[in-house]
Image (cartoon, grey):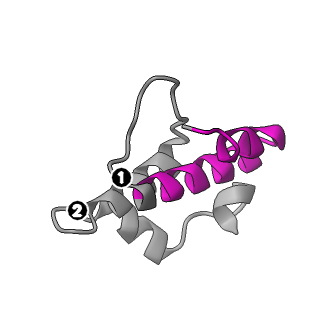
Amino acid sequence: MAWLSDRDPPDALTRSLFTMDWYDEDEYLGYLARVLKDNKRMEKGRIDYESPAEKSWRLFMEGLIAEKAKEPAGPGKCLNSPS
């Protein structure tokens, strides 16, 4: 995966995903794309999801970001949190 390695430039599909207007029912997916692009980490006390499904996706993104930063304990800590 090019995003994890930072060795390869983003492909056309990835670039278009980051530039799309997200004004429909899948808007949260656009937010998640920006989260990955900007390596935006979850903050304690700040909730950036509105449903259990969105929470699952957000925790998955947090895990990918932690993996990229070579923080193996990071994803497990988030995924095991009771909140």
Give the residue number, with chain letter if any, for mark 1: 31
Residue 47, image quadrant = top left
Q: Which residue type carries mark 2?
A: Trp
Q: Position of residue 74 (x, y in %)?
A: 74, 38
Q: Residues within 10 Å of mark 1 (few under 14, many from 20)?
A: some
Secondary structure found at label 2:
loop
Q: Which residues are magenta?
A: 54-82
Secondary structure found at label 1:
helix
Residue 6, image quadrant = bottom right
Q: Main secondary structure of the magenta part?
A: helix
Checking the image for residue 78, the label placed there is none
Q: Could you tell me which quadrant the C terminus lies in?
A: top right
**Residue at 64% of width from left, 60% of height from top?**
3
Give the residue number, with chain letter if any, for mark 2: 22
**If you read the primary sequence from the N terminus, does the residue marked by circle 2 or circle 1 appear first?**
2
**Residue at 37% of width from left, 62% of height from top?**
29
Q: Are marks 2 and 1 in contact (CB under 8 Å)?
A: yes
Q: Between residues 5 and 57, which one lies in front from this camera angle? A: 57
Q: Position of residue 34 (x, y in %)?
A: 41, 50
Taking 40 as reference, is 62 left or right? Answer: right
